[in-house]
């Protein structure tokens, strides 16, 4: 019993020390990556929703950072529009590892066949890639996006 308690105590102490290393070099690198990824996600994108990802079906995606948070904060929160103007909510970015990943929901009241659950990643080349899931319409679909040339 004493041995198990000793092991548990040692494990707990090691876990607390590891969790408290917020000033270590690893965490400094993570925070730098997060600060770069949050503003990199914001803006206007041309989202390719074509099955072949050949640019034959492109719709606008706009991502707006939550004004209540600074770009240095992560995970960042955001709102915006997808599919040519449909507002989305619950946007969250996790940039603690590369690639940065994000998710959001749209059409939660099912006015346009939703709800839709979107996930994506910020690729090293500055593009986005991801998938969307529609429960009501019963599909999963890949998508990709490049910075829009139209501001």
Image (tube, grey):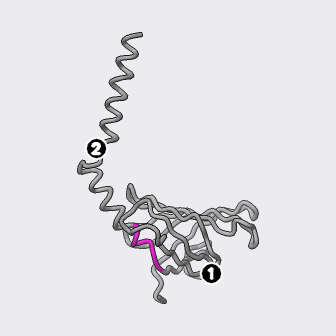
* Residue 85, numbered circle: 1
Residue span colored magenta:
38-43
Judged left or right of residue 78, residue 107 is right
Q: Residues within 10 Å of mark 2 (few under 14, many from 20)?
A: few
User: What residue do we see at 62% from left, 65% from top?
Assistant: 105
Judged left or right of residue 40, residue 48 is right
Q: Nearer the viewer, mark 1 or mark 2?
A: 2
Which residue sits furthest top? 1
The x and y percentages for residue 41 are 44, 71
Q: Number of labelled discs?
A: 2
Residue 117 covered by magenta stretch: no
- From the viewer's side, name the closer residue of 117 and 31: 31
Q: How far apart, in angstroms, are the residues tagged by discs 1 and 2?
A: 43 Å
Q: Residues within 10 Å of mark 1 (few under 14, many from 20)?
A: few
Vertically, is 50 above or below 1? below
Could you tell me which secondary element the residue under label 2 belongs to?
loop
Which mark sits nearer the N-terminus, 1 or 2?
2
- Tag 2 residue: 21
Judged left or right of residue 136, residue 51 is left
The x and y percentages for residue 96 are 39, 55
Q: Quadrant of residue 39?
A: bottom left
The x and y percentages for residue 119 are 55, 62
Judged left or right of residue 36, residue 63 is right
Query: Which secondary structure is most common in the magenta stretch?
Result: helix
On-image quarter of the N terminus:
top left
Which residue sits furthest bottom? 150
User: What residue do we see at 61% from left, 71% from top?
Assistant: 88
The x and y percentages for residue 77 are 49, 65
């Amino acid at each position: 019993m004493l041995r198990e308690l000793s092991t548990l105590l040692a494990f707990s102490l090691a876990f607390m020390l590891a969790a408290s290393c917020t000033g270590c070099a690893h965490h400094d690198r993570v925070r730098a990556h997060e600060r770069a990824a949050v503003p990199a996600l914001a803006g206007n994108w041309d989202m390719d929703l074509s099955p072949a990802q050949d640019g034959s079906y492109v719709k606008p995606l706009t991502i707006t950072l939550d004004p209540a948070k600074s770009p240095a904060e992560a995970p960042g929160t955001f709102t915006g529009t997808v599919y040519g103007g449909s507002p989305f909510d619950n946007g969250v970015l996790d940039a603690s590892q590369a690639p940065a990943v994000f998710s959001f929901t749209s059409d939660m009241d099912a006015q346009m066949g939703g709800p839709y659950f979107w996930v994506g990643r910020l690729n090293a080349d500055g593009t986005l890639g991801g998938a969307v899931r529609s429960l009501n319409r019963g599909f999963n679909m890949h998508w990709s996006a490049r910075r829009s040339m139209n501001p």
